[in-house]
Amino acid sequence: MSWLEDIPMAPLVVIAIFLGLAPFSPEPHAWEKLKMLAEGRLTRPLDIFDLLFHTAPLILLALKVFLGWRSSP
């Protein structure tokens, strides 16, 4: 996963925060879609794409931190 190591940490953190919290009101899309997933109402393809779009940077950031932590001595 060398491509993940090539992504700079600072921009990834900024993108993860902004996409994870956008739109800021009334509630973030990621939170809304996660609630829909928990309730079993996440069925429309657009909603599934929206969840993936808003959480992808968070997932990449978590992977980068985990793999960096795992490979450090």
Image (spheres, helix red, strand yellow):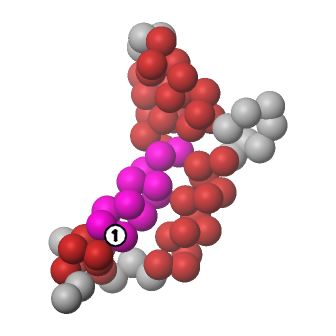
Q: Residue at x 54, y 23 (%)?
A: 35
In the rendered image, the quadrant that contains the C terminus is bottom left
**Magenta stretch mostly in which secondary structure?**
helix
Q: Secondary structure at mark 1?
A: helix
Q: Residue at x 38, y 60 (%)?
A: 62
Q: Is residue 32 left or right of residue 72?
A: right
x and y, in percent, of residue 17 in the image: 61, 59
Q: Residue at x 65, y 57 (%)?
A: 18
Q: Which residue occupies the extreme front position in the image?
A: 73
Q: Which residue occupies the extreme right position in the image?
A: 25
Magenta-drawn stretch contains 21 = no
Q: Is residue 43 left or right of residue 50?
A: left
Q: Is residue 69 left or right of residue 23?
A: left
The image quarter in which residue 30 lies: top right
Magenta-drawn stretch contains 56 = yes
Task: Give, as a three-letter code, the residue at label 1.
Answer: Lys
Given residues 57 and 44, the one toward you in this image is 57
Q: Residue at x 39, y 78 (%)?
A: 7
Q: Which residue occupies the extreme bottom position in the image?
A: 73
Task: Please give the range of residues in magenta.
Answer: 54-66
x and y, in percent, of residue 59 in the image: 39, 54
Query: Is residue 40 visible to the viewer in this orientation of the structure?
Result: yes
Measured along the vertical axis of the image, is residue 70 above or below residue 16? Answer: below
x and y, in percent, of residue 39 in the image: 48, 12
Query: Is residue 46 visible to the viewer in this orientation of the structure?
Result: no
Q: Which residue is mark 1?
A: 64
In the rendered image, the quadrant that contains the N terminus is bottom left
